Amino acid sequence: MTTDKATHGAVDEAYHKVSVKERLGYSLGDAASGLIFTGAATFLTFFYTDIIGLAAGAVGTLMLIARVLDAFFDVGVGAMVDKTKSKYGKARPWILWMVIPFALSGVLLFTVPDVGPGGALVYAYITYMFMNMAYSAINVPYGVLNSLITQDAYQRSILNIFRMVGALVGALAVTFFTQPIVKAFGDGKHGWTMAFVIFSLIALVLFLITFSTTKERVKPTVSQKEIPFKQGISALFRNKYWGLMVIFAIIVFVNNGLGGGLNIYYAQYILKNAELVGLLGMAGLLPILLGLFVIAPFIKRYGKRNVAITGSFLMIAGAVIIAFNPESVPVVMTGLIIKAIGITPIIGTLFAMLADTVEYGEWKTGVRTEGLVYSAGSFGTKAGSGFGAAIIGWGLAIGGYVGGQDSISASATSAIHFMFIYLPIILSVVQIVILYFHKLDKLYPQIVSDLKAIKAGKV
């Protein structure tokens, strides 16, 4: 009898309403990630090509190789999270363990010693891969935490919205304040280093707040022993919706990486004013931040998949508007704002849809592997933005771009136009095709009902 009550209490706690304090605390983790990870995605290619003097093609290759190698590390982190047992839970302790290495990685990225072009490229490889590994080791567990705080699908969507608000606040801060801070410290390499010393210290504090304000409540449906890695991987690849979400996440973050990484080039060479990069960043991020505060009722009424499809169509519309007059600041700003409105329901649902695949996998295979599932989220984020950065570097190289020049060739200009306007349209169409096959929104209520019945001992 006591066991039944305890089990029932655990079930109830897993479906309780998450407090505003915990939502806010959780959201600060992605704000911390955004300061370093978005900072790298937005400025690192430019820093390497125009401040350090590395070749654009070499930078593109660096971005891709580092992400491919890091994909294996992501899976390993996910497996280790699934095996972690501590008084803090299975995901939260990783935040505590990795917060200092992650903050340090942000500083090292933008601190390149004077060791010549070859030495600088080697240093860039080492520090960029270190940042990605540190990001995996803190962000995979952070993503897992969503599925451990609550098992209620709507509460997860709300948590995901808070998370994305945090991410956007971090992204806005690093996009808007980086160049003013760099200038305040005298421009050049020293200015960039000091900017990311500041951002990294803030990130450290924010992650510690996330650790102290969250709680893990969700337990497996049935008591299960430590899951062998091979069994966990086998279960993962029988989870078709997990596979769809991995591909979707990669495409979304390639799209996102293109926009963020090209803003500084587009402002300087197409709009002829490098100071506009902050304004372009605001146009691409602020509407998302505001939209996340109103998106929840639409998700509840129409479902995660449907609002994400609508968002993809809006992204196409925004890019088409820019194509009409790509050198007009008002037209570009209008197009970016519409694209940002379209991105809102996508990032407002992506990680919640990924969280839902945890329950689908448990229902389908009897094996619950939050860590491995969420390693896909981290991999999609990094691989997507890495491919985006690689495409930028390769595209610039194909166009004959040479960094640090007052003007660029017509072919380099065309390359920037294609990557900024037309490639995002193609990627948005791919997003719609992937989402067409996603049917989990309709299945999820029955899946949760079945899992509840098993937990309560009725099956």
Image (cartoon, grey):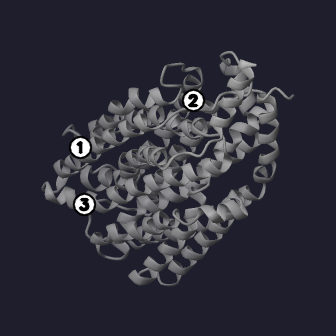
- Looking at the rendered structure, the secondary structure element under dot 3 is helix
Separation (CA) of disc 3 from disc 2: 36 Å
Cβ–Cβ below 8 Å for labels 3 and 2? no
Q: Is residue 7 above or below residue 440?
A: above
Separation (CA) of disc 1 from disc 2: 29 Å
Q: Is residue 34 above or below residue 124?
A: below
Name the residue located 29 percent from the left edge and 69 percent from the top edge: 274
Furthest residue toward top: 225
Check disc 2 and report the residue beneath it.
78
Q: Nearer the viewer, residue 249 or 126?
A: 249
Q: Is residue 436 left or right of residue 404?
A: right
Which percent across, then down, holds residue 345? 60, 62
Q: Amino acid at mark 3?
A: Gln
Q: How many marks?
A: 3
Crowding at mark 2 (Cα within 10 Å: few <14, some 14-19, many 20+): many
Q: Nearer the viewer, residue 327 or 230?
A: 230
Which percent across, then down, holds residue 310? 67, 68
Crowding at mark 1 (Cα within 10 Å: few <14, some 14-19, many 20+): many
Give the mark nearest the N terminus, 3 or 2: 2
Q: Amino acid at mark 2?
A: Gly
Mark nearest the camera among 3 and 2 is: 2
Query: Is any atom of residue 402 visible in this view?
Result: yes
Give the mark nearest the N terminus, 3 or 1: 3
The disc at residue 197 is 1
Q: Amino acid at mark 1?
A: Val
- Looking at the rendered structure, the secondary structure element under dot 2 is helix
Check disc 3 and report the residue beneath it.
179
